[in-house]
Structure formats: C-alpha cells, structure tokens
Image: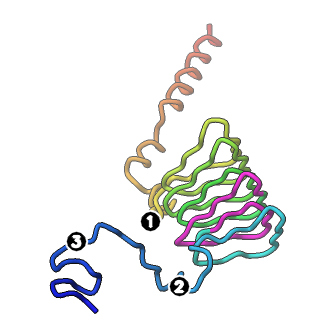
Amino acid sequence: MWKRGENEDGMGVGAVADISVPKPSSRSAGKANSGLATIGPSITVKGDVIGDEDLMIQGQVEGTVVLKKHSIVVGVEGRVRADLSARTVMVEGEVKGNLTGQEQVILRQSARVDGNISCPRVTVEDGASFRGGIDMRGATESPQSVATHPSVKSRQRSTPHEHSNAASSDEAKKVGNR
C-alpha cells in the first residue's frame, strides 16, 4: 500500500522523478534487438532487402537494399554489390553500386565506393576511395527544375571559358593573316 502523501511511484506528492527510462515503441515491442538488424560476416544475401529498421552489413549483399526511413551501415568487413537507399547511408567497407540518401551519405576513411551518390549532404573522409558522380540537389529539386532556373540559363548562354576560346580563336586568325 501507499503511504499517505505519496503517489503510486512511492514519491512524495509534487516530487519530480530524475530518472528517464525509455519506453519501448510499439514497432520494436517484442523484438529481441533494439531496431538494428545485422548481416554478419559469414552471411551472403542475394536479392532485394527491404525493411523498417536500421541495418548493419558486415557480410556480402548482392541486389538492392531499401530502408527509406532508416539507416544503412556497411561495416569494414561489408562487401556490397547493390544499390543502397536509406535516410542515411554510411560506408566503411566496399560498395559497388549507387548510394541514395534522404538526409546524408558518409564515406569513412576505410570506404571503397564505385558508384554514384545522390543526397543533399555528403561527407567523404580523407583516405576514402570513391569513383563516381555526386548529385547534391534536394529531393524536391528535379534536374529539369535546376536546368530551367534563371541563374543556370544565364551560365549556359555564355561562360567565361567560351569567351576565352573565342578570343584565342580570333587571335589565331590575326596571327595567321600576318
């Protein structure tokens, strides 16, 4: 029973608890792991991986991996031949495929990536190996909207490089006529 002046928690009325205990979300209730799935070093997955939790890849994956609202981490031992798409993608191992991040793509020092990156924020640490292209437009910006933007149109009409080529071409004609 409770003592007079105490609530159900055994604390005095008006007292504030200084302990914060995280409550399990309804999605993770009943799961042994706290929302992180792992493909271990001895595991090989061939096909499409789609899920609703964060994923750590330490093994081999071939195909596609799509975790739209979650994170993908390719660990140091991870070997991936797949396109990866997630809220955030971090690579410490090897990826041959395109990386698409809703928020951020991070290539750690040990990363080796051969593919294109599409994400608003990209971090490449010193020592990482990367071969491909980077598109940092926001998710709402399409290539067509960027190409029709007035500042891009003005740059497309005349660039300083084109002017210098035209000037050198005129100079060459003058020298040839002498």
Q: Which mark is first along the chain, 2 or 1?
A: 2
* Image quarter hosting the N terminus: bottom left
Q: Residue at x 62, y 48 (%)?
A: 107
Residue that extends furthest to the top in the rendered view of this protein: 178
Work out whether 141 lies above or below 64: above
Which three-letter amino acid code belongs to the residue tagged 3? Answer: Val
What numbered label is drawn on residue 29? 2
Question: Of 21 and 29, which appears nearest the observer?
Answer: 21
Counting from the top left corner in percent of width and height, residue 59 is at 79, 62
Q: Secondary structure at mark 1?
A: loop
The secondary structure type at the circle numbered 2 is loop
Residue at mark 3: 16
Choose top left, top right, bottom left or bottom right for residue 81. bottom right
**10 Å neighbourhood of mark 3: few (<14), some, or many (≥20)?**
few
**Magenta segment:** 55-78
x, y percent for residue 139: 48, 64
Q: Residue at x 78, y 66 (%)?
A: 61
* 73 and 154: which is toward the camera: 73
User: In the rendered structure, which amino acid carries the disc numbered 1?
Assistant: Thr
Answer with mark 3 or mark 2, whichever residue precedes in sequence.
3
Q: Which quadrant would the C terminus be assigned to in this image? A: top right
The residue at the point 44 percent across, 65 percent down is 140
Q: Provide residue 6's location: percent of width, then percent of height.
A: 20, 83
Q: Which sits earlier in the primary sequence, circle 3 or circle 1?
A: 3
Where residue 10 sits in the image (x, y, percent)?
27, 81
Q: Mark 1 = which residue?
A: 140
* Position of residue 103 in the picture relative to residue 55 (left or right): left
Q: Amino acid at mark 2?
A: Ala
Quadrant position of residue 149: bottom left
Of circles 3 and 2, the one toward us is 3
